[in-house]
Amino acid sequence: MRYGAGCEDDEAVVSWLVKEHKVCVVPGTACGCPGYVRVAFANLDEGKCKQAAAQLKRGLQQLVRQGAAALDGSTSAEHGVDRSAAPNEDL
């Protein structure tokens, strides 16, 4: 999937998703698809898989809405992201 404007650096996107949304994906450049991310849900039970998918969805929605501004090092709270459904640190 493509994400927001100015987010072509898929490695920066991956780092940001880990830091801000506690979900890890593979940069597309590692798979020959720069500008994209690769998602794998292997070895997760159904509950954790659903939670990880929801966290990833929130992160990607934020990127689409805010583009590169989301990657500028600001926190989610500064960008109006609801973190009340705090991500599970075990994912």
Image (spheres, rainbow, N blue to C red):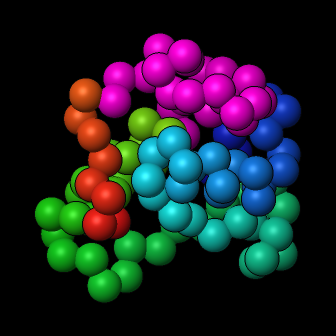
Residue drawn at 35 percent across, 23 percent down: 82
Residue 81: x %, y % from top left: 44, 22
Determine whether 33 is above or below 30 in the image. Answer: above
Residue 37: x %, y % from top left: 66, 60
List the single residue furthest toward the left.
47
In-image side of 21 versus 11 (left or right): left
Determine whether 61 is above or below 22 in the image. Answer: above
Q: Which residues are magenta?
A: 60-83
Q: Quadrant of residue 64?
A: top right
Q: Nearer the viewer, residue 67 or 19?
A: 19
Numbered marks: total:
0
The overriding secondary structure of the stretch rendered in magenta is: helix
Please state, as top left, top right, bottom left or bottom right, where the C terminus lies in the image.
bottom left
Determine whether 16 is above or below 30 in the image. Answer: above
Q: Nearer the viewer, residue 39 or 72?
A: 72
Residue 74 falls within the magenta-colored stretch: yes
Q: Is residue 71 visible?
A: yes
In-image side of 49 versus 40 (left or right): left
Residue drawn at 55 percent across, 49 percent down: 19
Residue drawn at 47 percent across, 14 percent down: 80
In-image side of 21 versus 87 (left or right): right
Q: Is residue 67 visible?
A: no
Residue drawn at 51 percent across, 42 percent down: 20
